[in-house]
Amino acid sequence: MARSALINVMVQAAMKAGRSLVRDFGEVQNLQVSVKGPGDYVSQADRKAEEIIHAELSRARPGYAFLMEERGSVAGEDDQHRWIVDPLDGTTNFLHGIPVFAISIALERQGQIVAGVVYNPAMDELYTAERGGGAYLNDRRLRVAARSRLSDAVIGCGLPHLGRGHHGNFLIELRNVMGEVSGVRRMGSASLDLAYVAAGRFDGFWERGLSPWDIAAGILLIREAGGFVSDMKGGQAMLEDGSIIAGNEPIHRALLKTVTKPLKA
Ligand code: 2AM
Ligand code: CA
């Protein structure tokens, strides 16, 4: 499969940062047993990966703006283009030696996501999508799962973090979903969760309280794999609202209805 120049630039940046993360991940596994733990080391690994991605993308496309997890917003002379980057999505997994983490890079053109790359360097799984060009896992074209009944579906989710989100409300949502689906999974990396929906591994996914860099690339992966994505109100304000729900058309519809079902006493 021939990749466009744009996707090649993004893949190169993701892979270079991925090599750096994998080296540091090896060290984190060694530090697991120390009392202080690998906390500072992980922050450094995260910043190093972001630095690599920023340098690579700036070199290849000078003037584009950035929105990055660590640096925040960086203005560019080109007001049409913005990179949305998470250099290490799944930090808690990384910190604990769990190989489920990813680099997420999306490109927005005039406010529309036009390209997305999600890369899990520990498993060497590279997800790419360009608007109108389909979604891929390595060289394989992706299609969301075809299951149409919730009772057959495996649904991914994210839990609200300590001190954030409404834990009680999440438990209501989870109870609603558990009662109707075949299984529920929680991986801890939103960008990979969305990639799993695109790949048909998860039939659907929902989470609240996310940031644009967690989801921008994954949204395009799912759309280009034929799936449906919305915020939890059914609108398209995922980046602004931080909530997301996804699946194929019937699963997306049914899951949205189920998750937001009022609790019966
Ligand atoms: P991160 O690893 O880059 O922080 C898992 O539910 C998702 O939530 C991950 O994509 C993770 O991204 C993000 N996340 C983890 N801790 C968070 C926190 N304290 N606040 C908001 N998002 C968080
Ligand atoms: Ca993240």
Image: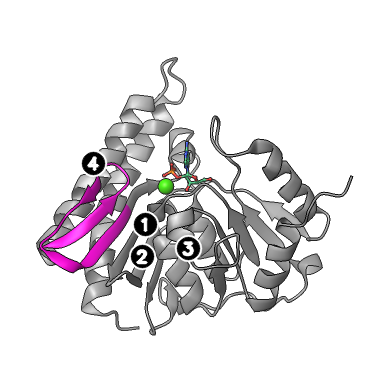
- Which numbered disc flags the more N-terminal residue, 3 or 2? 2
Q: Earlier in the sequence, mark 2 or mark 1?
A: 1
In the depicted view, which residue is nearer to us: 41 or 248?
248
Kindly check if marks 4 and 2 are in contact, taking CB atoms under 8 A apart as contact: no
Tell me: 206 left or right of 88.
right
Residue at 76 percent of width and 55 percent of height: 177
Q: Position of residue 32 (x, y in %)?
A: 45, 26
The number of numbered discs placed on residues in the rendered structure image is: 4
Depth-wise, is mark 3 or mark 2 nearer the camera? 3
Region rendered in magenta: 63-85
Q: Alpha carbon of mark 1 to alpha carbon of mark 4: how far?
A: 15 Å
Q: Is residue 100 above or below residue 91?
A: below
Q: CA distance from mark 2 to mark 1?
A: 6 Å
User: Looking at numbered disc 4 in the image, what kind of residue is underneath it?
Assistant: Lys
Query: Is the CB atom of the residue marked by disc 1 within 8 angstroms of ligand 2's nearest atom?
Result: yes
Marks 2,1: beta carbons within 8 A: yes
- In space, the residues marked 3 and 2 are separated at their CA atoms by 21 Å
| Within-10-Å neighbours for mark 3: few <14, some 14–19, many 20+ | some
- The amino acid type, in three-letter code, at marker 2 is Val
On the question of residue 125 being in view, the answer is: no
> Which of the marked residues, 4 or 2, is nearer the chain's N terminus?
4
Q: Is residue 101 above or below residue 151?
A: above
Residue that numbered label 2 is attached to: 117
Q: Can residue 243 be found in the magenta stretch?
A: no
The residue that mark 4 highlights is 48
